[in-house]
Image (cartoon, rainbow, N blue to C red):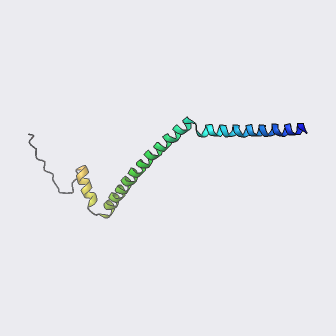
Amino acid sequence: MFEARSSILFRRVLIGLLVAGVIGILTLRVVDPARTARAEMLERQLARLETIDGVMGRENARLEERLRGLEEGSTAWKELARRQHGMLSAGEVIFRFPVASR
């Protein structure tokens, strides 16, 4: 009977040590400073990418509106060509006057 009790006690201690070891290992993995630093770095990177996404979304909406204006407006593309590229319609002449520097 003494052997049965010691065998049961041994098994319980062994199982207890095994459970404690597993819990210890899991705790070390969760509380690992390198893991925490990586998680913080990834959170900062996510915040930065979300900011960039917002900026790009607004820029995309602005460009879509501009494209829609160019497609629907009959003279909008002509005005854009005049302003940005100095293009002229047939028969137009540009006069450039020198500006006196002060």
Image quadrant assignment for residue 8: top right
In the displayed structure image, the side of residue 76 where residue 93 appears, left or right = left
Image quadrant assignment for residue 31: top right
- Location of residue 101 in the rendering, given as x and y in whole percent from the top left corner: 9, 40
Indicate the quadrant containing the C terminus: top left, top right, bottom left or bottom right.
top left
Q: Foreground residue, 23 or 61?
A: 23
- Location of residue 80 in the rendering, given as x and y in whole percent from the top left corner: 26, 55
Q: Residue at x 36, y 53 (%)?
A: 59
Q: Foreground residue, 40 or 62?
A: 40
Q: Residue at x 47, y 46 (%)?
A: 46
- Location of residue 61 in the rendering, given as x and y in whole percent from the top left corner: 37, 57
**Residue that lies at the very extreme toward the right in this rendered image:** 1
Q: Foreground residue, 82 or 51?
A: 51
Q: Residue at x 23, y 52 (%)?
A: 83
- Location of residue 24 in the rendering, given as x and y in whole percent from the top left corner: 66, 37
In the displayed structure image, the side of residue 84 where residue 15 appears, left or right = right
Indicate the quadrant containing the N terminus: top left, top right, bottom left or bottom right.
top right
In the displayed structure image, the side of residue 23 where residue 59 appears, left or right = left
**Residue that lies at the very extreme toward the front in this rendered image:** 2
